[in-house]
Image: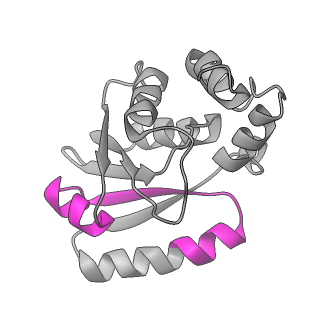
Amino acid sequence: MKEGITAVCPGSFDPITVGHLDIITRASEMFTKVIVVVMTNTSKTPSFSVEERMEMIRKATAAIPNVEVDAYGGLLADYTRLKQAKAIIKGLRAMSDFEYEFQMSLTNKKLNPDAETIFLTTRSEYMYLSSSMVKLIGSMGGDIREFVPAVIHEDIKRRLSGKDA
């Protein structure tokens, strides 16, 4: 690891899962600073507000001193330039993830040649896990305890069960 290198870990994190947290934790061991940035994805309708997602990420990463949490509504390439980040961290679960993420990495490289995309493969126990799956299971009253960080489990469960209204 080179000293002073900032990495950005972007996503919608709606909500953050243990798979996300694993990628963030591993990235924090490789870079001086990791900025977890909640990005706006206009093709998705979030269950949690940007502020709620940021707060959940802060709680889940509280024990990782070199992680910061932010939000951004523009292009990831512009954000990395703004933060002088040299790396974009993306987690991959399957080949289907790779095809999309590879296209995005080439686009980001064209828009900001100073930032490299680093792919971290998920651990096998998280290959099936997604925020969408958590929301589906939680909204039907299923147990999501193994899928989300313990510190935010009750918050997520309450929202997805509809008892947070």
In the foreground, 12 or 140: 140
Residue at image x 78%, y 50%? 128
On the question of residue 29 being in view, the answer is: no
Residue at image x 63%, y 41%? 19
Residue at image x 44%, y 62%? 118
Coloration mode = one colour
Residue 80 painted magenta: yes
Total tally of numbered discs in the picture: 0
Span shown in magenta: 75-101
In the foreground, 138 or 88: 138
Percent across and percent down for residue 7 are 31, 50
Residue at image x 70%, y 71%? 95
Q: Against 112, is 57 above or below?
A: above
The quarter of the picture where the C terminus appears is top right
Percent across and percent down for residue 33 are 27, 40
Is residue 160 shown left or right of residue 118? right
Quarter of the image for residue 28 reads top left
Q: Against 87, is 1 above or below?
A: above
On the question of residue 108 being in view, the answer is: yes
Q: Against 4, is 87 above or below?
A: below
